[in-house]
Image (tube, rainbow, N blue to C red):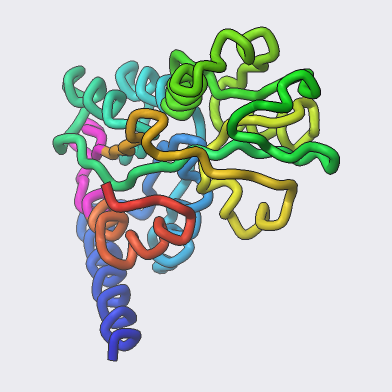
Amino acid sequence: MHNAFQFLFTFILAQVIFSSCSKSGEGHLTVAISANARYAIEEICDTLEVQGLNIEIVIGSSGKLASQIIEGAPFDVFISADMNYPKAVAQAGKALTSPMAYARGRLVLWSCRENVSPDPTFSNLEELEHVAIPNTELAPYGRAARAYLKDIEMWDSVYPKLVYGESVAQTNQFIFAEAVDVGFTAMSVVKAPDNIGIGSWVELPLDSYPPVIQGLVIVDREGRSSLAAQSFVDYVLSENGLEILNKYGYDKP
């Protein structure tokens, strides 16, 4: 019964999106996504396979995406790694909705090197040459990683070995390429189907860094109908959307 209801809900919502696109003349949504949310949102987009609706994904750091939106970039929905950047978009008059929290992210320490086991205490620091971390000014997961290192009183010790990625995506590239020994990233990355079983990772205690509450907002496209964008957001915030987000390690905010 539950599966039947879930199917019916998805079907009805898909019809709403298709109807919205048809009535407004829209057949295309451009969704700006923070790098950490890429895999989960891609699966949500795959779930909403509706003829006539084409979802284009643009991936980047939350800070840069927010700046682009404020400067007029043609995005319909902005999915951030925190709440601050959606709030900045709204304060700049570029949002049609108030910022909405959609998930709480989790921080992990990950290594793709065979001879390295991620140690959350960094007791093996002398054996490490490089530690990857997302930009601690622009990337929310970078700020969370910095807060974690300060919480365990290891910031000053690890700092000289840090290699900065512009975003979670670039940090992941450093880890994948084994250009670093270990790196901080989002749990959603290591739980992505293509990444399961690659390297080793350990989750860092939630009480050791501020909650990574991730938010989204519908962007004001100056006259363009937002019906399809609203329907897309409704699905992300629905029970079906939350089930997909949970699969990637996200919690309800």
Q: Is residue 25 visible?
A: no
Residue 136 image offset from top left, x and y in percent: 48, 16
Which of the 4 image quarters holds residue 21? bottom left
Foreground of the two, 173 or 74:
173
Who's the residue at 20% across and 59% down the image?
A: 23
- State whether residue 185 is above or below residue 152: below
Q: Is 244 part of what is drawn in magenta?
A: no
Who's the residue at 57% across and 8% down the image?
A: 156
Who's the residue at 69% across and 13% down the image?
A: 161
Residue 133 image offset from top left, x and y in percent: 59, 23
Magenta stretch bounds:
217-230
Which of the 4 image quarters holds residue 121? top right
Foreground of the two, 158 or 33:
158
Foreground of the two, 120 or 69:
120
Residue with the most extreme front position: 123
Residue 68 image offset from top left, x and y in percent: 39, 21
